Image (cartoon, rainbow, N blue to C red):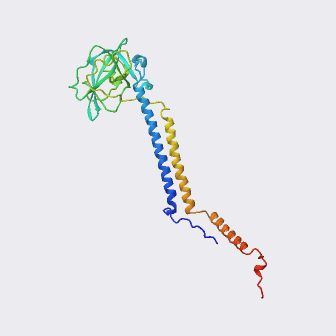
């Protein structure tokens, strides 16, 4: 009778080590490949944002009218504003961070040419109001990023000065003698090859530290989608690998009863076959007859 193979007693049995190692390598590889694809999808989004932030500037008046609500699809878009500085209307926004320092935004409105409305321009950052350089005067063409009005739950407890906790256009309307656009502009730094404009830019506004655009444009919904789908696919492969490993371990450690019966039947058949092969002349009647000789 053939010896019957016994199943492993434990999941830690040496016979199971090969399966454990295989699933560990497979799942680890699939997870890492998924992470790589996910990071690639995020990089694609960041690349598209960088392209939008450094796109060719549009004329401010072509993006928003003085009575228009803020065009949210244009958030962070580079725009070029031409007009006249209004230094007497300069304000400062408190609590603005630049690196590890906290200071103020220096903000001066520009009366947009060919209109009677103004837009606030964030000229830059200063550590103290008293150390801020004087606001510029005269005509200006400034390129910057279009931003929506800020709003927080911080109340302005000092309504008699020109320091504000946020750049809230609705709050500033009642404190200025000009109509205001429902947006403001953060001055962009002058970079080689950008802004792509034939007009001089940012003249009279380079006397304070630069600040990045606080709100960046949103990438397209399809940006990085292919890599994201690849990442999900790899992670599903990892889950499937774990499932296959679990089924293998379960079936190996705890074989089903019908499988045991099949094995027993196979063993009985093997025994009968061995007897038949040993005495081919023997008949069933011979098995019950004893010789008197």
- Nearer to me, 74 or 155: 74
Quadrant of image for the N terminus: bottom right
**Residue 206 image point, x, y percent:** 28, 21
Q: Is residue 141 above or below residue 216?
A: above
Q: Which residue sits at x=45%, y=41%?
A: 36
**Residue 67 image point, x, y percent:** 41, 18
Residue positioned most to the left: 130
Residue positioned most to the bottom: 293
Q: Which residue sits at x=60%, y=69%?
A: 4
- Marks counted in the figure total 0
Q: Is residue 292 above or below residue 185?
A: below
Q: Which quadrant would residue 122 be assigned to in this image? A: top left
Q: Which residue sits at x=57%, y=60%?
A: 251
Quadrant of image for the C terminus: bottom right
Q: Is residue 90 above or below residue 103?
A: above
**Residue 171 image point, x, y percent:** 33, 24
- Nearer to me, 200 or 60: 200
**Residue 124 image point, x, y percent:** 29, 25
Q: Which residue sits at x=51%, y=42%?
A: 232
In this picture, residue 106 sits left or right of residue 242 = left
Q: Is residue 263 above or below residue 75?
A: below
- Nearer to me, 279 or 28: 279
């Amino acid at each position: 009778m053939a010896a019957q193979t016994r199943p492993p007693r434990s999941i830690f049995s040496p016979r199971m080590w090969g399966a454990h190692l295989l699933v560990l390598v497979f799942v680890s590889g699939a997870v890492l490949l998924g992470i790589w694809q996910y990071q690639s999808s995020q990089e694609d989004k960041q690349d598209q944002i960088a392209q939008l932030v450094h796109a060719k500037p549009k004329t401010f008046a072509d993006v928003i009218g003085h009575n228009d609500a803020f065009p949210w699809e244009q958030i962070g878009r580079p725009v070029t504003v031409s007009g006249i500085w209004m230094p007497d209307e300069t304000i400062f926004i408190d609590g603005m961070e630049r690196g590890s320092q906290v200071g103020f935004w220096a903000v001066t409105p520009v009366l947009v040419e060919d209109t009677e409305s103004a837009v606030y321009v964030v000229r830059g950052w200063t550590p103290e109001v008293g150390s801020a350089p004087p606001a510029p005067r005269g005509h200006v063409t400034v390129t910057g990023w279009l931003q929506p009005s800020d709003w927080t739950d911080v109340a302005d407890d000092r309504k008699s000065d020109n320091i504000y906790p946020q750049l809230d256009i609705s709050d500033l309307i009642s404190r200025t003698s000009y109509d205001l656009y429902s947006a403001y502009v953060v001055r962009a730094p002058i970079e080689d090859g950008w802004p792509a404009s034939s007009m001089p830019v940012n003249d009279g506004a380079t006397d304070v530290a630069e600040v990045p655009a606080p709100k960046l444009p949103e990438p397209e919904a399809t940006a990085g989608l292919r890599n994201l789908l690849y990442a999900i696919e790899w992670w599903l492969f990892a889950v499937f690998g774990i499932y296959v490993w679990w089924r293998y371990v379960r079936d190996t450690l705890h074989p089903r009863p019908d499988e045991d019966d099949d094995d027993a039947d196979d063993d009985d058949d093997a025994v009968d076959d061995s007897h038949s092969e040993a005495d081919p002349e023997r008949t069933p009647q011979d098995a019950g007859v004893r010789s008197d000789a």
